[in-house]
């Protein structure tokens, strides 16, 4: 969105690729010695400039929980503010597939303490049943640091993966073993912020997250992307959308759209 209110036109987010044959082999991911292990869910230091492993994000998880089939079959989602800290998640036909709600467990008097609290993002289906839970923690004691991570689980407690924020517009998405499977990068401009681009370990663009109208965010991904990767991308889009709303309010409600914040 430019500062005169015009809508940013998204280019086609995906690079051309050849079809994957049945006999195509993908090397197993190499577990980084500093990455977060499945049984060590705490405050880890982000790994700077780590390249995603050449992991087959199209076959990362063969199974899909029945309640997430709408997400599995989707190729584009629009997130728009509903009321307060609640968002509607719609498909291209404007059908509401899910809602997302933000809740905080924060000791506001200790904002620089990473252990002071967390922010939870809960995604629910139209029956108001929780289907995805993301909990965000600070990774630094510095009040100015943007280093954060979000632990993503299903309501059953099954760990899906983690989203690590390394810089203002730089993220890593990891699987259950802590291997980086997707990276997200985006340029920052004076008045506009182009879409965040999402890349697999093979350097293939598989998704993008960008602003549409006002504080609405659009998540576009390859329909064949595996369900766990889509879950991680949805949670990070929800967390970005929450930040957008806060900045829009700080800039005077809907007038904040002219500032293109993330």
Image (spheres, rainbow, N blue to C red):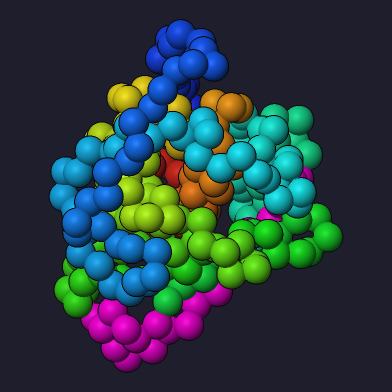
Pick the front one: 188 or 128: 128
Q: Left or right: 209 with respect to 98? A: left
Q: Residue extending furthest right?
A: 127
Pick the front one: 176 or 24: 24
Identify which residue is drawn at 65% across, 68% down: 156
- Tell whether position 101 is magenta: yes
Question: 225 above or below 245?
Answer: above
Tell me residue 197's x, y (percent).
37, 32
Pick the front one: 221 or 84: 221
Tell me residue 209's x, y (percent).
45, 37
Q: Left or right: 160 with respect to 87? A: left
Q: Left or right: 194 with respect to 30? A: right
Is residue 253 among what the camera can see?
no
**Range drawn in magenta:** 96-117
Question: 230 above or below 82?
Answer: above
Find residue 122 and report its image quarter: bottom right
Identify which residue is drawn at 78% across, 64% down: 128
- Tell whether position 200 is magenta: no
Identify which residue is drawn at 80% across, 55% down: 126
Find residue 39 and report its image quarter: bottom left
Pick the front one: 220 or 130: 130
């Amino acid at each position: 969105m430019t500062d005169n209110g015009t809508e940013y036109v998204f280019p086609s987010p995906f690079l051309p690729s050849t079809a994957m044959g049945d006999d195509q082999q993908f090397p197993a991911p190499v577990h980084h010695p500093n990455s977060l292990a499945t049984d060590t869910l705490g405050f880890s230091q982000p790994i700077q400039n780590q390249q995603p492993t050449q992991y087959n994000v199209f076959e990362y998880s063969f199974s899909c929980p029945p309640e997430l089939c709408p997400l599995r079959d989707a190729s584009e989602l629009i997130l728009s503010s509903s009321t307060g800290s609640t968002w509607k998640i719609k498909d291209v036909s404007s059908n509401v597939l899910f809602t997302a709600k933000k809740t905080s467990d924060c000791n506001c008097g200790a904002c620089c303490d990473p252990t002071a609290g967390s922010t939870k993002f809960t995604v629910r289906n139209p029956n108001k049943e929780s289907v995805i839970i993301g909990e965000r923690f600070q990774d630094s004691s510095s009040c100015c640091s943007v280093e954060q991570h979000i632990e993503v689980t299903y309501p059953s407690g099954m760990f899906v993966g983690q989203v690590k924020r390394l810089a203002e517009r730089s993220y890593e998405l990891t699987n259950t073993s802590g291997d980086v499977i997707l990276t997200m990068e985006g340029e920052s401009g004076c008045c506009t912020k182009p879409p965040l681009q999402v890349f697999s370990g093979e350097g293939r663009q598989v998704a993008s997250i960008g602003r549409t109208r006002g504080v609405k965010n659009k998540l576009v991904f390859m329909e064949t992307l595996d369900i766990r990767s889509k879950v991680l991308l949805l949670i990070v889009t929800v967390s970005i959308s929450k930040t957008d709303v806060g900045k829009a309010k700080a800039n005077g409600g809907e007038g904040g759209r002219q500032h293109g914040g993330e």
